[in-house]
Structures are given as C-alpha cells and as structure tokens.
Amino acid sequence: MTLPIRSSRLLIRMLSAGERDAFVAYRRVADVARYQTWTTDYSAADADALLADQPRAHLPTPGGWMQLALLISEPVDGELLVGDVAVGVDAAQPATYELGVTLAPAHQGQGYAQEALTAVIAWLMGVQGAHRVVMQGDARNDAVLRLARRLGLRHEGSVLEGDWFKGEWTTLERFALLRREWEARPR
Ligand SMILES: CC(C)(COP(=O)(O)OP(=O)(O)OC[C@H]1O[C@@H](n2cnc3c(N)ncnc32)[C@H](O)[C@@H]1OP(=O)(O)O)[C@@H](O)C(=O)NCCC(=O)NCCS
C-alpha cells in the first residue's frame, strides 16, 4: 500500500505546493521553531526548496527525508493543513526510520500528532517492513517527550549536551520502537 494513509480524522499524504503557505506560516512561529532545525525567518523559498527535494517514490532513499502533510477536511476551506510528519530513512540501516512531527499552534492539544504518528508507524511497520522506528527530542521539549511516551516508544537514553544547537550545548532524548515491540503492543 502506498500513500495516502487515512486515520480517523486525518488524510496523510506527501506535502504539496498547495500547502506551502500554511506550512511556512506555522514554521515561522517562535514556539514551533524553538527546538527545530529551522528559525522564524523560514521563507517561501525555503519551503520551495524542501518541496523540490521530496522523493518521487512513496519513501525516501537511505539517508533521505520526506515530509507528509496532515490534513483535515473543512466544509469551506476543503483540505486544511494541521501539521506535518517528517520521515527519514537511516543511511546505514535502511529498515530504521526516524520520525519528526510538527503541528500548527491552533491544532495542538487535540491528539492530532498522536493519531498521525500511530498511523505512520503502523504503515512503516505493517506495510513497509520497518524493523525499527526512532524519535529524538530536545530534553526541554516536554510536548514531544510526552508524545513519544504516549506512543509507546521506549526511552533509549539521553545524549547529554551532545548537540551544539542554536548557540548552546543541548541534551537529546532518544526513543525507539522495534517491530516486535509494536506487534506485541497492548491493543
Ligand atoms: C510536538 C507536538 C507535535 C506535540 O503536539 P501535541 O498537541 O502536544 O500532541 P497531540 O496532538 O498528540 O495532542 C496531545 C495532547 O492533546 C490532548 N488531547 C486532546 N484531545 C485528544 C485526543 N482526542 N486524543 C489524544 N490526545 C488528546 C492530550 O491530553 C495531550 O495533551 P497533554 O500533552 O497536555 O496531556 C507539538 O508540541 C509541536 O508541534 N511542537 C513544535 C514542533 C516540535 O518541537 N516538534 C518536535 C520535533 S520531533
């Protein structure tokens, strides 16, 4: 099965040019950008470069990333972008996938990230043959640490001041889920 993925409230497919302006708008919010690789001056040109770099297939090649759009249906606006999930494929271990997630502020606190990642993990494990899914977050980013735990990812450790990030040494928390752990999860 290829994309799109459907969950109870979301349509999940490759990010496309039609979502560009909404994507740029939330990437420019300080609270959204704080623990991410970009800064609040993220521009339409940056988004165009990201869109041009998306894989043509439904998964990136080893070492690459793709950006999935999280969309809800609105009566007036049609498909509305609430956020995105980044899926990376490990360069050395291509059955290992790294996930990142971002929601626009107006759509946080409603379970969309949990719903989206649950669906993407099921797709990677159940359909794409993933062996391992990993997430990492800045130790100060409570929302993403709570999310990883809610999803049932196992805390693998802290990389103490291992990352020179936006002008300071920061600590990363690492989480992982093996396919056999996912298959044995409580339903
Ligand atoms: C990380 C991030 C996506 C988490 O978003 P979130 O809204 O907290 O996560 P969810 O969408 O799963 O929502 C869960 C929250 O909604 C609440 N909620 C409300 N309705 C819910 C529902 N139907 N189902 C599940 N949770 C629900 C939960 O109780 C939870 O709140 P809590 O954490 O205060 O207990 C968000 O903080 C974000 O975009 N941050 C900026 C980008 C970033 O730093 N990303 C991390 C990079 S890896």
Image (tube, rainbow, N blue to C red):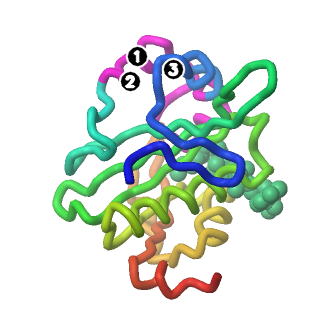
**Vertical comparison of 112 with 75: above or below:** below
**Residue 27, quarter of picture:** top right
Q: Are marks 3 and 1 in contact (CB under 8 Å)?
A: no
Q: Are marks 3 and 2 in contact (CB under 8 Å)?
A: no
Query: Which dot, 3 or 2, sits closer to the camera?
Result: 2
**Vertical comparison of 160 with 50: above or below:** below
Residue 55 lies left or right of residue 24; in this view the side is: left
In depth, the one of 177 and 1 nearer the eye is 1
Q: Which residue, given by chain and number where applicable, does mark 3 sit on?
A: 42
Number of dots carrying numbers: 3
Say what amino acid the circle numbered 2 marks.
Leu
On the rendered image, what quadrant is the N terminus found in? Answer: bottom left
Q: Is residue 131 visible?
A: yes
Q: Which mark is residue 127?
A: none
**Residue 73, quarter of picture:** top right
Residue 25 lies left or right of residue 67; in this view the side is: right
Crowding at dot 1, Cα within 10 Å, few <14 / some 14-19 / many 20+, comes out as some
Q: Which mark is residue 48?
A: 1
Q: Are marks 1 and 2 in contact (CB under 8 Å)?
A: yes
Q: Secondary structure at mark 3?
A: loop
Task: Identify the magenta region.
Answer: 27-52
Say what amino acid the circle numbered 3 marks.
Tyr
Q: Position of residue 92 (x, y in %)?
A: 16, 60
Query: Which dot, 3 or 1, sits closer to the camera?
Result: 1
Crowding at dot 3, Cα within 10 Å, few <14 / some 14-19 / many 20+, comes out as some
